[in-house]
Image: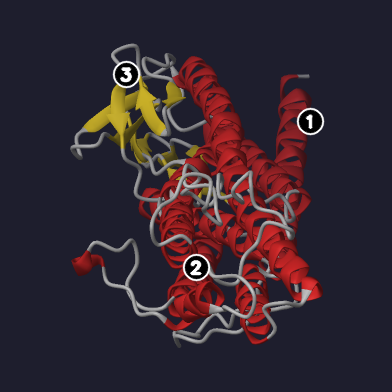
């Protein structure tokens, strides 16, 4: 009798195990398209057997649900996502900067000549010096003098416009960083809250909060897109999240269910915690926006400032070699791309082709020669090479920076895809596999039901027999 009851208990446990397996399989199928879901599997373990007076009897089985997740692969996915996001942010800022020039520049062009589009700064520079040359050929032509002043005005406007556009690009990048810092701090709070919830669930059942763990991993991957982070799981299932400061030392952002250090931005730099520890992220969109805005874009603006200053100094020296007050072509106080302007006293009527008047074109010739003059910083100039060469190098430089960022993003995206596929092979849900498991568990359940039915019939027969004997 005890043997049948023991077998009945074992069969009931088997039915329970197959029921849980079917439930887990159904959950896997339901979440096949959930991006943060990791496949769950049922682990059935035999608790062993004992020797009784009726023979060997099973002590039952235990059933547990396990996530198919690798902490190493998760960290790799976060790292690759952070790198991709950083390159993407850089690419976006550099695309805006290149568009601000209004030039059609080949990303691989490093020639001194460059390629300019109509309406670009290069075209404005060429148009100005061409007008000066035409004026030198016809110094008494009022139309030519008007063209010189008009093209000079277009040139100064174009310099100011480009500088203003680049300034706006930097402002947009800074604003994006400020917005992203707020998002990052919100994500840190979410991780801390999930840590607390996971700890509460897993106090008596370690590893059981599988859905919360999936949710937390999704938040961590969002966080990594902004900032590179390292994640370490504690004994109670709570993640510790750190990032590196400017010296490469870890800064704790999340500790258990608390956020000891939130991020802030000031003066184009990132800081963490109430002590304002300086951060220097190596990847992520925060790093991408900061690097592009303060690096390539700022270098371009500085180069344009030098170019504008050199044009002002050289043209003024040619037009007004004696430095007479009120006799300059450009305003001598405007020596940057954002401030270059014509001298207030200059008009088409006051413009002179030469100091002697009449057919004297010496000043116009000297101004025209500036276009082909080779400058050198070693001689005290602001630029190296000719004006055209300098601008071509600047525009090609931003094009090359954009090309590099684009290539890096393409390569990194491929790496990210490979790592993502590797994790998917472990954690992803395969409908074919789940359907196969579902059939297997279904048949096992049916078999256990048959056994249960047989034992039930045997016990019923036995009870009937015993009842007849005692009657």
Of marks 3 and 2, which one's residue comes earlier in the chain? 3
Residue positioned 38% across, 40% down in the render:
229
User: Can you tell which quarter of the image residue 117 is in?
Assistant: bottom right
Q: Which residue matches tag 1? A: 464
Residues marked 3 and 1 touching at CB (< 8 Å): no
Q: Is residue 130 left or right of residue 275?
A: right
Q: For label 3, count other residues whose C-alpha is less than 10 Å away and answer few (under 14), some (14-19) or many (20+).
A: some
Q: Which disc is residue 276 wearing? A: 3
Q: Which disc is residue 268 wearing? A: none
Q: Please indicate, yes or no, whether residue 203 appears anywhere in the rendered image.
A: yes
Residue 348 at what x, y percent from top left? 74, 60
Viewer-side residue, 129 vs 244: 129
Q: Is residue 468 left or right of residue 368?
A: right
Residue positioned 43% across, 73% down in the render:
390
Which image quadrant: the N terminus?
top right
Residue positioned 27% across, 72% down in the render:
376
Q: How many angstroms separate mark 3 from mark 2 (CA)? A: 33 Å
Q: How many angstroms separate mark 3 from mark 1 (CA)? A: 83 Å
* Above or below for 213 versus 354: above
Q: Which disc is residue 398 wearing? A: 2
Question: Which numbered disc, 2 or 1, marks the residue closer to the eye?
Answer: 2
User: Can you tell which quarter of the image residue 73 is in?
Assistant: bottom left
Of marks 2 and 1, which one's residue comes earlier in the chain? 2
Q: Is residue 233 left or right of residue 85?
A: left
């Amino acid at each position: 009798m005890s043997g049948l009851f023991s077998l009945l208990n074992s069969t009931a446990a088997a039915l329970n195990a197959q029921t849980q397996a079917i439930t887990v399989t159904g959950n896997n199928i339901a979440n096949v398209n959930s991006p943060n879901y990791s496949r769950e599997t049922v682990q059935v373990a035999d608790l062993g057997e004992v020797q009784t007076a009726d023979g060997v009897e099973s002590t039952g089985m235990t059933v547990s649900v396990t996530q198919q997740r690798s902490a190493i692969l998760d960290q790799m996915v976060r790292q690759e996502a952070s790198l991709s996001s950083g390159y993407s942010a850089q690419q976006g800022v550099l695309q805006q900067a290149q568009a601000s020039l209004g030039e059609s520049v080949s990303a691989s062009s490093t020639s001194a000549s460059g390629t300019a589009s109509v309406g670009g700064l290069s075209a404005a520079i060429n148009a100005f010096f061409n007008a000066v040359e035409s004026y030198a050929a016809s110094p008494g032509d009022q139309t030519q003098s008007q063209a010189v002043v008009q093209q000079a005005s277009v040139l100064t406007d174009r310099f100011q416009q480009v500088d203003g556009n680049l300034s706006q690009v930097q402002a947009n990048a800074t604003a994006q960083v400020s917005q992203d810092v707020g998002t990052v701090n919100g994500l840190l709070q979410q991780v801390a809250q999930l840590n607390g919830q996971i700890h509460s669930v897993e106090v008596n059942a370690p590893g059981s909060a599988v859905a919360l763990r999936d949710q937390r991993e999704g938040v961590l991957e969002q966080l990594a897109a902004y900032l590179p982070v390292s994640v370490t799981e504690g004994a109670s299932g709570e993640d510790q999240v750190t990032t590196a400061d400017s010296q490469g030392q870890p800064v704790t952002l999340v500790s258990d269910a608390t956020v000891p250090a939130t991020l802030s931005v000031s003066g184009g730099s990132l800081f963490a915690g109430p002590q304002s520890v300086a951060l220097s992220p190596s990847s992520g969109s925060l790093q991408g926006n900061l690097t592009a805005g303060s690096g390539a874009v700022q270098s371009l603006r500085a180069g344009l400032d030098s170019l504008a200053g050199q044009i002002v100094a050289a043209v003024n020296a040619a037009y007004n070699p004696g430095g007479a007050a009120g006799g300059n072509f450009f305003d001598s106080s405007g020596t940057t791309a954002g401030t270059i302007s014509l001298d207030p006293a200059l008009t088409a009527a006051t413009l002179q082709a030469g100091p002697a008047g009449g057919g004297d074109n010496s000043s116009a010739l000297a101004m025209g020669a500036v276009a082909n003059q080779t400058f050198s910083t070693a001689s005290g100039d602001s630029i190296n090479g000719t004006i055209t060469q300098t601008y071509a190098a600047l525009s090609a430089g931003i094009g090359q920076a954009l090309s590099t960022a684009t290539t890096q993003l393409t390569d990194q995206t491929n790496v990210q895809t490979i790592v993502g596929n590797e994790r998917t092979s472990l954690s992803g849900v395969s409908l074919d596999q789940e359907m196969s498991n579902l059939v297997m568990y279904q048949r096992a359940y049916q078999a256990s039901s048959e056994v249960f039915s047989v034992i039930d019939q045997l016990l019923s027969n036995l009870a009937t027999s015993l009842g007849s004997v005692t009657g």
